Amino acid sequence: MADRLTLQERSEHMARIRRSDTGPERIVRRLLTELGYRYRIQLAKVPGRPDIAFTARRKAIFVHGCFWHAHTGCSGHHVPKTRSDFWSQKLATNKARDQRLLEAAQAAGWQTLVIWECEVKDRQALTARLRCYLGHQRAEKLPADSN
Ligand SMILES: [Zn+2]
């Protein structure tokens, strides 16, 4: 496919993608609420600044957009044809930063789960995955996160 966008248009297009990047995170949060889990968002004190944190369980969820976080092997991840060197480098930098953030959380004793944008479309699978990661809410009767 020919890339007919000018640099300006391309950069505006990318900015729109970045803004809508919060979409998958909203879907995950809404589902967690529906399932009865209590969570904190973007808790500054958790290393790696996960999108969603469960302080009592010491579990964190990172929700990643497939483009900006360069989901390997995913159709949502492609390097734009215009300024492809720039984008390759930028997306590689993003990916390396993600890895550092995950490791920071893990080093501080947090379990981590990455949910990709392409994975939130299948609600049933996502529900199963969240329950598997977090444990069944009703069965566990864990104290609600208090901080
Ligand atoms: Zn993906």
Image (tube, grey):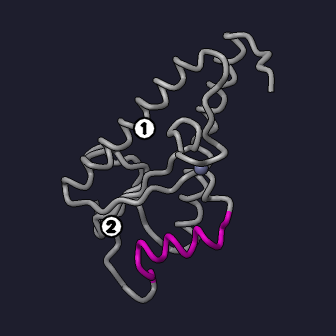
Query: Left of 8 or right of it: where is 35?
Result: left
From the image, state whether disc 2 or disc 1 is nearer to you. 1
Report the magenta residues as a range.
122-137
Q: Earlier in the sequence, mark 2 or mark 1?
A: 1
Residue drawn at 67 percent across, 65 percent down: 122
Place of residue 139 in the rendered image (x, y in percent of width and height, measured from the top left): 42, 89
Residue drawn at 80 percent across, 21 percent down: 2
Secondary structure predominantly adopted by residues drawn in magenta:
helix
Position above or below: 23 against 139: above
Residue drawn at 65 percent across, 43 percent down: 76
Nearer to the camera, 16 or 89: 89
On whether residue 129 falls in the magenta region, the answer is yes
Query: Which secondary structure lies at badge 2?
Result: loop
Quarter holding residue 16: top right
Place of residue 133 in the rendered image (x, y in percent of width and height, measured from the top left): 42, 72
Quarter holding residue 56: bottom left
| Amino acid on which disc 2 is placed | Asp
Place of residue 49 in the rendered image (x, y in percent of width and height, measured from the top left): 34, 44
